[in-house]
Image (cartoon, rainbow, N blue to C red):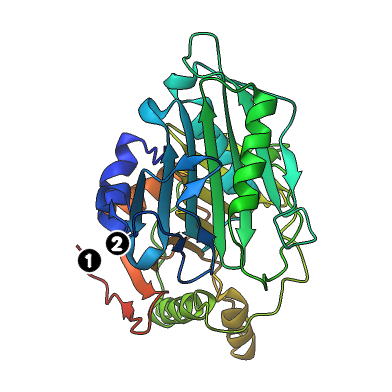
Amino acid sequence: MASYWMNACFLAAALTLVAGSAAAQEPLKVKPGKVWKHQHSGISVPATLAGNARTSATSFAADDLDVGLQFDTPGSAEAVSVYIYRNTNGAVPVWFAQAQWAIENRAIYGDPNIVGAPSALTPPGQTTASGLSAIYAANGRSQYKSTGVMLLPIGNWYVKIRASSQTRSPADLARWMDAALAEIEWPRNIAPAEAASPAVPCAKPLQFQGKAADASGSDLTAEALGVALMSAAAGDDSIKKEPATTSMGQWCRDRQLDGNIAVYRPGGSETSYLLAYGDNGNGIWVGPSPMKVAMDEIASKNGTKASLRYNVTLHTATQDINFLLQDRLPSPERVIEILNANNRASTVGTWGKNRQVQINSGEKLK
């Protein structure tokens, strides 16, 4: 039931660059009839969930960084799925909206209608409504009566629960999903997360001043190195980080591209955005170079003015890929061109003990 929707122009780049793509999926090792425990988060999922026995388990990325567990009756008449994937970017409102799109555009549900509005969800063992939930009534053309999704943050991880039924009403399905949530064993100590609210349409579309191009300058190599080192530090889950004291604000959805690819902006930002594709946490952050402040300080001491450059970073479960800096804010179409060209400034491993930082000297990496 996992959805990894991409449009044609994105497909080649994504399958090449993302190690955790759907094309790399393989069976997850589980013991028949036994509880499966996610080694990194401490989440334990029983072999039978909400009355359904586990029917399959799949790994979508190395080292249990993106996994899915299925609990289906024959023919998937009653289906529950649990997905756990690493939080490397975005926020619950983004990935919840992506999950909603995947439901609303699946033919088997026949243009389902949401029952009420998405609701806030307080994850077990937490005190803040940091998760979101939505229940749908399937269209009369569908063999299903109801379907739904929950998304909640657990420390450095996202947990998504999906359910569909050919017999249960939307209200019954909601209670069934609550039962599944209650049967999962959660870690005792979970880092606090901020309250979540669904993404809203942006008040006005993001504006782009001309077409972006690769930036130029004698300091590009130094800036690329700085960006790579910042990626390495930000992606290190072993570093103790204080809970965020400031929110990124209300996420808004700017526009939808082909397939499940959409533009999201935190706090209605006019200088940055996240290009999300699929619903398993892979996204491209586009915004001012994180080295801008440092470069500005150096430039001011030298009596010069640093150029504002924009960074394009593909965040996956295992690595950040930083592409060549751009001379202005690139449009989503330009970002797709950049990914297809595969002109990287650096590739930074963000998971595992032997993480590497690879700086590109300028040639195209293949």
Which residue, as the protein is rendered here, is positioned at the far left?
Answer: 366
Which residue, as the protein is rendered here, is positioned at the far bottom?
Answer: 301
Q: Which of the image's four quarters has the C terminus?
A: bottom left
Work out how far the residue at label 2 is from the one at label 1, CA to CA, in angstroms: 6 Å
Task: Please tell me in which quadrant of the rendered image residue 296 appears.
Answer: bottom right
Task: Please tell me in which quadrant of the rendered image residue 179 appears.
Answer: top right
Which dot marks residue 283?
none
Give the side of residue 352 with respect to residue 291, left or right: left
Vertically, is 234 above or below 66? below
Residue 190 placed where, x, y %?
67, 70
Tag 2 and tag 1, C-beta contact below 8 Å:
yes
- Residue for point 43% across, 77% down: 228
Residue 106 placed where, x, y %?
45, 25
- Residue for point 43% across, 65% down: 325
Q: Nearer the viewer, residue 239 or 36?
A: 36
User: Nearer the N terminus, badge 2 or badge 1?
Assistant: 2
Which residue, as the protein is rendered here, is positioned at the far front?
Answer: 33
**Numbered label tally:** 2
Residue 347 placed where, x, y %?
34, 71
Number of residues whose C-alpha sits closer than 10 Å to that of mark 2, classed few (under 14), some (14–19) or many (20 or more): many
Q: Which residue is mark 2?
A: 343
Q: Nearer the viewer, residue 248 or 288?
A: 248
| Residue 322 visible, this orientation | no
Q: Which residue is mark 1?
A: 365
- Residue for point 42% across, 49% down: 69
- Residue for point 43% across, 20% down: 107
| Residue 262 visible, this orientation | yes
**What secondary structure is found at the residue carrying circle 1?**
loop
